[in-house]
Amino acid sequence: MTLTDTRVDNPKGPGARARVQKFGTFLSNMVMPNIGAFIAWGLITSLFIEVGWLNLAAGGNLATDGWVAQLGGWGSRMVDGEEVANTGIVGPMITYLLPLLIGYTGGRMVYNERGPRGGVVGAIATMGVIAGTSIPMFMGAMIMGPLGGWTMKKIDALWDGKIKPGFEMLVDNFSAGIWGMILAIGGFFALSPIVTAVSTALGAGVQFLVNNGLLPLTSILIEPAKILFLNNAINHGVLTPLGLAESQATGQSILFLLEANPGPGLGILLAFMLFGKGAAKASAPGAAIIHFLGGIHEIYFPYVLMKPVMIIAAIAGGASGVFMNVLFNGGLRSPAAPGSIIAVYSAITPQSILGVTLSWIVAAAVSFAVGALLLRISKDKGEGDLGAATASMESMKGKKSSVSSTLAGAGAGAGAATLAGPVKNIVFACDAGMGSSAMGASVLRKKIQDAGFRDVKVVNQAIANLTDSYDIIVTHQDLAARAKPMVPSAVMFTVDNFMGSPVYDDVVDAVTQANSADAPASTPAPAQAAPAASGTKKRKKLDPNVLPREAVKLGLSATSKDEAIRLAGQTLVAIGAAEEGYIAGMLEREGQVSTFMGNGVAIPHGTNESRGHIQRTALGFLQFPDGIDWNGKTAYVAIPIASNSDEHVSILSALATVLADKSKAERLRTTTSVDEVLDLLAPEEE
């Protein structure tokens, strides 16, 4: 069953639900990449605090000056003959580490074009609100992190391209430091009191619901909102910050289980498994395992969307689970993410075992009972179009679901090879986002434009900076395992030859088919006159700062690929583009994935981590007329790259055009003229 397109634009703009989803997703995306740190804090807390598992297992008799007490921050110990309180690592982690991670992530989400710059300023700004209050400043981090990244981006734009060569690092470092300082001071004096007051008020509101037995009623809002794909927004954007504050104060929080309880979804899937029919009945057992053990709650959303009356079962189950936690003091120390039963019990407190266990069992039993009743009195018995419901869910989500193929009856391979609708964004990804991806993107961009789809955007990006916002991803076959998890919604194409791969034609065919099915996402370019003969187009003057004459070296020889890479790196060092440490990064990058592009050209460059050794953007050109064995291929030209920006992309684009012409590629291999090299690599006028 082929899923329908889920990226249909609304000509009137996004509705209120879509805007809430977008904002909620933005908030949750600051938390979710750091869930591992939250889990680490929760485990440390569960084990080492005074009422933690280790002390309880010892009957509460562990010495207050022992290593458990020291890690947990309770008791005291003697230091230089004086008794001092144990500080531990539980308090510092929740006070400093977790908010700073959120602030850094938020800053980098907003501004990642120049590496971690936006994240660093976001973290500095977050430190101001942390220091200005005594409560965990998660809400403040969600404000100051993105604010720091966004404002730094705007400031950098003021003098982009106006700084004289050699002063870039000085301006970059001091502008980030000075602006970070200003934001930290502002956060300390202005934002901390506001966020503290808001957090206190929200906490009081939650306590009011608990004291008056009204907390189960939150399921009336939470369960339908989950089905509308606001689950991560609710859980990580709202409940997690409030829950962490409560957990620090009381040792646990019921808020972590308002949305994450796997019981309601389990009961609904069990009802379909026993009383449903057709595809819903057949797929429910597998979906139940993914939901309950894997923690992917979205797997049961299509079942409810297919039969909306089942939302009653979800609400009843959710409210029953909350009631059990209220009645028996159930709660978790830290978020259960993903919402797997395994994650739930890893964050459980000793005193809440009974309440939490009853919460998911009772929630599952109630939602099963209500769902079974609804199915049995229904005429269709759950025989609706599960594939259509899945597509509806993805439409609300705004992208493909990573588990949708399970419900649609397609295997993973089939799901990965089908484009459901118009293609708008294609990313070519490599390790560092400099040479390989820039070259590949240039070749593919030209093919896409020549096919008439000029508004299909083709960009290059480092794998570490990918976001799940692309329709198609193209990468080297050796990098596929790393790249795919970063963009699970995209269709992936892999290549083994960056310049001449037939896979590019497959991508063009896929775009043509997808963008021609309905009203095309892009308008084919109007017919144009045949291109001018080679050499008649005007060329721009090549920037001597990017590729200086002294970086063009002809007639070289090398006995190995590594020697050629070292020569290429030394060329960049000699022109002041990189430090010596960058050469090690170039060799490491070559060990990960070959930088051989095809047609006799290699583009050695460093890893993403080695960018700190780059001083300015520049290229080199090294010619080896006798050829070098480059992982079984023969390279005659090596073009080393050092870049922290996109300044080199225009030259790589020109190079891609040159290499597509075998006669020009041969001239680069054999020429003895530096001027001819610079002329061939100069970008053409638009």
Image: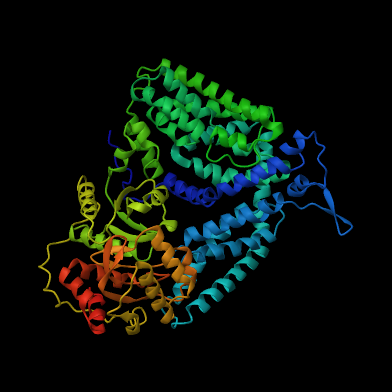
Asked whether 438 or 636 is in front, the reply is 636
Instruction: Tell me the residue at 62%/25% (across/down).
Output: 358
Relative vertical location of residue 298 with respect to residue 636 in this rendering, above or below: above
Q: Which residue is drawn at 23% across and 47% down?
A: 514
- Seen as rendered, the residue at the extreme right is 81
Residue 621 falls in which quadrant of the image? bottom left
| Residue 535 left/right relative to 376 | left
Spot occupied by residue 503 in the image (x, y as percentages of width and height): 24, 53
The residue positioned 68% from the left and 35% from the top of the image is 349
Q: Is residue 659 above or below residue 329?
A: below
At x 41% / y 25%, what residue is drawn?
Answer: 284
The N terminus is located in which quarter? top left
Q: In which quarter of the image is the C terminus?
A: bottom left
Please, which colouring scheme is shown? rainbow
| x and y, in percent, of residue 377 in the image | 41, 15
In the rendered image, residue 50, in percent from the top left (x then y), is placed at 77, 41
Residue 304 showing in the rendered view: yes
Foreground pick, 551 / 357 = 551
Compared to 46, does 632 lie above or below? below
Q: Is residue 616 left or right of residue 425?
A: right
- In the rendered view, tell whether residue 602 sits above or below residue 273: below
Residue sticking out furthest to the front: 559
Depth order, front residue of 119/53: 53
Tag count: 0
Give coordinates of residue 259: x percent, y percent: 55, 36
Q: Is residue 685 visible?
A: no
